[in-house]
């Protein structure tokens, strides 16, 4: 695995709720996504972490870190956090995504005008070249290739059957359907 994403790598930009969650990713090597709010495809090459206001004035609203994805499994929240057996969502299912080492991106990617972000698919090339988060959006022919790659990953990992996945959408619905999902991951 490269020390930074390769240009064609499939990247999932994911909301990381707090500095403590980033420490879990760094020290324990995993990240959680509630299955009810997860994007359609989680079989990606890398996760990049969007840091909200909880990171404080100097680190909020940007992407500073990414990590290679090594695999994923289903787990209950109570299995992830042994000390939270009485949590209201203790019995909820989560994707536990196993990660390789966190890397600091060559330069942080500020949010610009985008302050609310949950999930966004992009490529390694866009991640490394982006000046702001809006530069991560994929358009034109590259969008078709990204869509095809997401579809192939979903089928290859047997996450979905062919009839569960729509054909290439017309218009600008790709990010709404498979990239930016409502809600947040801080549950």
Image (spheres, rainbow, N blue to C red):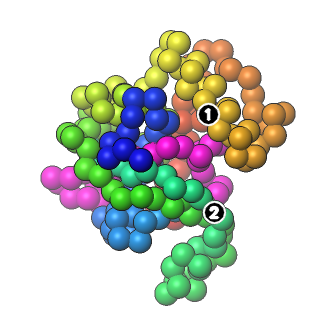
Q: Quick check: 103 above or below 148?
A: below
Q: Which class describes the residues within 10 Å of circle 2: few (<14), some (14-19), or many (20+)?
A: few
The reply to whether the C-beta atoms of the residues labelled 1 and 2 are less than 8 Å apart is no
Q: Residue at x 46, y 39 (%)?
A: 11
Query: What's the mark number on residue 1?
Result: none
Q: Is residue 54 magenta?
A: yes
Q: Residue at x 53, y 50 (%)?
A: 183
Tell me the SS state at disc 1.
Answer: helix
User: Furthest residue to the top?
Assistant: 140
Which sits earlier in the primary sequence, circle 1 or circle 2? 2
Say how many tags the image has: 2
Q: Quick check: 18 above or below 87?
A: above
**Residue pointed to by mark 2:** 73
Q: Which residues are magenta?
A: 33-61
User: Furthest residue to the front?
Assistant: 1
Where residue 50 sits in the image (x, y, percent)? 36, 48
Where residue 46 sits in the image (x, y, percent)? 45, 45
Tell me the SS state at disc 2.
Answer: strand
Residue 35 vs residue 179: left or right?
Answer: right
Quarter of the image holding residue 113? Answer: top left
Q: Residue at x 59, y 59 (%)?
A: 72
**Residue pointed to by mark 1:** 150
**Residue 107 versus residue 113: which sits nearer the camera?**
107
Quarter of the image holding residue 34? Answer: bottom right
Where residue 69 sits in the image (x, y, percent)? 49, 52
């Amino acid at each position: 695995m490269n020390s930074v994403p390769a240009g064609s790598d499939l990247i999932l930009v994911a909301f990381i709720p707090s500095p403590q969650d980033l420490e879990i990713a760094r020290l324990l090597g995993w990240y959680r996504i509630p299955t009810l709010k997860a994007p359609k495809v989680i079989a990606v090459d890398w996760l990049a972490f969007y840091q909200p206001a909880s990171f404080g004035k100097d680190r909020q609203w940007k992407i500073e870190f990414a990590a290679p994805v090594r695999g994923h499994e289903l787990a209950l929240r109570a299995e992830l956090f042994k000390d939270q057996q009485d949590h209201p969502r203790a019995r909820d299912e989560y994707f536990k995504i196993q990660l390789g080492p966190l890397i600091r991106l060559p330069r942080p990617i500020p949010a610009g005008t985008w302050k609310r972000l949950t999930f966004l698919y992009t490529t390694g090339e866009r991640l490394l070249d982006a000046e702001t988060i809006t530069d991560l959006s994929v358009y034109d022919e590259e969008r078709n290739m990204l869509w095809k790659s997401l579809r192939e990953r979903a089928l290859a990992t047997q996450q979905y059957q062919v009839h569960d996945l729509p054909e290439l959408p017309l218009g600008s619905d790709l990010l709404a359907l498979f990239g930016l999902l409502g809600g947040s991951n801080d549950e």
